[in-house]
Image (cartoon, coloured by chain):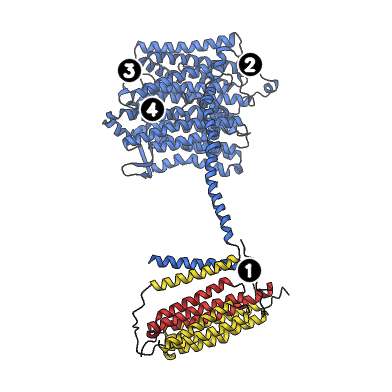
Chain colours: A yellow, B red, C blue
Amino acid sequence: MSSILIIFGVLAAITIATAFLTIYSRNPIHSAIYLVICFFSIAGHYLLLNAQFLAIVHIIVYSGAIMILFLFTIMLMNLNKENEVHKPRITRLGAIVSFCLISLVLIAIFVNSKPITDGSYDVLGEDYQSIKVLGKVLLNEYMVPFEFASILLLVAMIGTVLLSKKEKSEK
Amino acid sequence: MNNILNQIGIENYIFLSVILFCIGVFGVLYRRNAIIVFMSIEIMLNAVNLLFVAFSTYHQDAQGQVFVFFSMAVAAAEVAVGLAILVSIFKNLGSIDINNLKNLKG
Amino acid sequence: MEKNLALVLVLAPFLGFLFNVFFGKKAGKNIVGIIGTLSVAVSFAVSLYFFLQINETKKPIIIDLFDWFSLQSFKINFGFLLDQLSLLWLLFVTGIGALIHLYSISYMHDDENMHKFFAYLNLFIFFMITLVIGSNLLVMFIGWEGVGLCSYLLIGFWHKNQDYNDAAKKAFIMNRIGDLGFLIGIFTIGFLFSTIDFVDLKEVVLGGTNSGNTLWIGIAALALFIGASGKSAQIPLYTWLPDAMAGPTPVSALIHAATMVTAGIFMITRMNFLFEMAPLIQNIIAIVGAVTALVAATIGLVQNDIKKVLAYSTVSQLGLMFLALGLGAYEVAVFHVITHAFFKACLFLGSGSVIHALHGEQDMRKMGGLKNVMKITFVTFLIASLAISGIPPFSGFFSKDEILMIAFENNITLWIIASLASIMTAFYMFRLLYLTFFKEFRGTEEQKHHLHESPSLITFPLIVLAILAAIGGLISLPGNSWLHEYLAPVLPAVINEEHAFGTTEYMLMTIAVIGGLIGIGIAFAKYIKQNQVPKEDAQIVGFSKILYNKYYVDEFYELIIVKPINVLSNFFRDTIETALSAVVFGFGKAAEAVGTKGKILQNGSIGFYLFAFVLGVCAILTCLFLAK
């Protein structure tokens, strides 16, 4: 068992465990913390695959921005303690059923699609994913989506601000 | 220089991603707290991102990572707007139980 | 040039119609009357011009307007055929039409819808002209239908009275039954000969390779005859004509005496070459004509409404014309059409004058003694009555005598029937004359005070028509017939032999005249010498009652035809209609049920929606995966 496989296994275990705990825990703050740990483990996966830029961006955006937003919202709503009534039984059953169903479908698809090669993965021999190359690809071929992404973010900001404004007529 | 997938094998990544995605789906259907539902959606998005990066390594192509880049941008925007909506709902209804959001019935 | 003139001929009355419809109410009664009459007078002038032209050149004028529709081997044009026959018809249609328009200016002056009346009259003339000058059977059919329509509009002109509306409907429906026959005839002819143009048909039929088709030709001829009998009121489709007297008197004069009812005879004369190939049908036509003449004459003997007597007289005279047609004597029938148009129109207009003076009274038992007060009406009426009774030297004598001669030559029984009908005609016409104009006035004092001769616009057409009725015989004197020469190119060659004048002919003439005088004498004896007045309705018994009620034919039709149709309609409405409605509405109900059930899916809970979402994605993925 090579060391890389062990690292992969550990990281995968952390990912799955924290993801499960996110949805399982009662306290939303606990869920948020577990999710942060999950994101960190995924960033570890990215590093394992040699996608350095993406790993750092992942940590900054997800753990550093998105989860902060979540935490702020949770604290805004004072959801420290949660006494959540269980959903009716049929719903829980439905959820479990659909979980099994979709996992089966997806795995079946992937297993029966084009066969994984026999173990020899091709190697390009040159750098294809360092930040330099990534920058070139991003700003040459994907220039227009890049600009659109910025507009998207602008629109999201405007939307958010609008949604949070106090309605003058109501008060 | 060897492809790291030689040592890990792409099918492991596929399984991981699929299981992560299904956990996300389960979370969406199972929980009543809207915040947790959102978090489950984030899990789903991350699962997909992971798969993209794995395949980018498989094909030795940067385009997979570019897509992840954009996916992250979209996820960020979506979280911002979604949380703003959630806060509005909280202000109107007092709780964020998704079972209370039934006005569009019929 | 000729095309333009022909278009003027056809369109002048139509423009009159349009003017009267759109501007009539505003323009006022005088203008309406003048425009109406003028448009018909213009048509008369154009037809006179064409008539003189054809009289010289003796060649028909064919005008093609446009290709109407053309199938692979079958072409139908829309065009006009101006030959001797159609011009003769045009002359008296437009001429008498113009006179009647003139008459109507005064007669309908008190009516508030006078512009509508003139509009309908103009429309009628337009359609009649189209009928007469059409170059093929379909254009003629357009005119045919159109005159039926105008007849309906004009009979029901005073539409506030439901009885009149029923009469109009009856006329239209009976006409339609005949039209069905006509259409079947057209289709059969089109099928047999691949053309329905008159000129082409004549060539093809006379070309002579059709002896194998006699069955179909017979069917076509019979169908055409049914159409003609619907329009020209022969048995069994004659009951509409007496009821059609519900319309104003100028309508009766124009449509139901002189023009529309002659359309059937016109059509048969046009298609004479076809009928010549179906001798069985010709026999049927002759028999039907003779029987109709007799039956209608018997009914006319006891009627008390002045217009109904004239109506039955019309049916009877039309029967005589069909008798002549059935015996192959087309020009004799045409001659009688022309003379009948003159004297019958004069009689109707005269009766209209009487009715107008009596402010709407039509029952002869309440008239009498009018000859001193309405001198012109009386004199013209007398002349026309003498003409219809067949007294020389008036025109009716010549035409009726020719018919009797032809009948005698072919079949004695038919001659006896026709002569009986003629004697009865003389009787009831003079009965009408004596009851209306002689003896003492039997109406109210009020009416007696207001009796006066009608204004000149009414008496002028009467005078013109009476003169024509008197001298009309000149166009076809025995032995020297201008009409015979004139129509020779249109009619079959076989019948064109002139028979020499021998003792048989003179004897027959004398017998006819004596018969007429007998009829007049009996009427004189009854109503002048014995001073009889017809009984009131309740007192009529016995055979007279049967005659008075028209042999109960209307009731018979009601029982046999109308009631079953009503039952059938009720059946359709009650069972089939409800079943169909249930099916159609059932679709709506099914959709509604599905919708109601499907509404449950939209319960608004997000959890459920998400669940459905996931299921849907699974389903799509499975399908895509399996489809590989």
Q: Amino acid at mark 2?
A: Ala
Q: Nearer the viewer, mark 4 or mark 3?
A: 4
Chain ID at mark 2: C
Q: State the CA–CA distance, disc 2 to disc 4.
A: 42 Å
Q: Quadrant of residue C165?
A: top right
Q: CA distance from mark 3 to mark 1?
A: 113 Å
Q: Amino acid at mark 3?
A: His
Of all residues, the one furthest to the right in this rendering is A171
Rounded to the nearest angstrom, the CA distance separating label 4 from label 3 is 30 Å
Q: Amino acid at mark 4?
A: Leu
| Cα gap from disc 1 to disc 4, whole angstroms | 85 Å
Label disc, if present, on residue A130 of the rendered structure: none
* Whether residue A108 is situated above or below residue C577 in the rendered picture: below
Q: Residue A9 location in percent, x, y?
A: 46, 84
Q: Most extreme residue toward the front, as rendered?
A: A1
Chain designation of label 4 = C
Q: Badge 3: few (under 14), some or many (20 or more) residues near its Cα, within 10 Å?
A: few
Q: Quadrant of the N terminus of chain B?
A: bottom left
Which amino acid type is marked by label 1?
Asn
Which disc is residue C538 wearing?
2
Disc 2 crowd, CA 10 A, few/some/many (<14, 14-19, 20+) = few
Mark 2 and mark 3: Cα distance apart in space = 52 Å
Residue C221: horizontal and vertical position, in percent? 37, 28
Residue tagged by mark 4?
C222
Q: Earlier in the sequence, mark 4 or mark 3?
A: 4
Front residue (pair C593, C366)? C593
- Which chain is mark 1 on? B
Does C359 appear above or below A28?
above
Nearest to N terminus: mark 2 or mark 4:
4
Q: Is residue C439 above or below residue C321?
A: above
Badge 1 is on which residue?
Answer: B99
Q: Under tag 4, what secondary structure?
A: helix
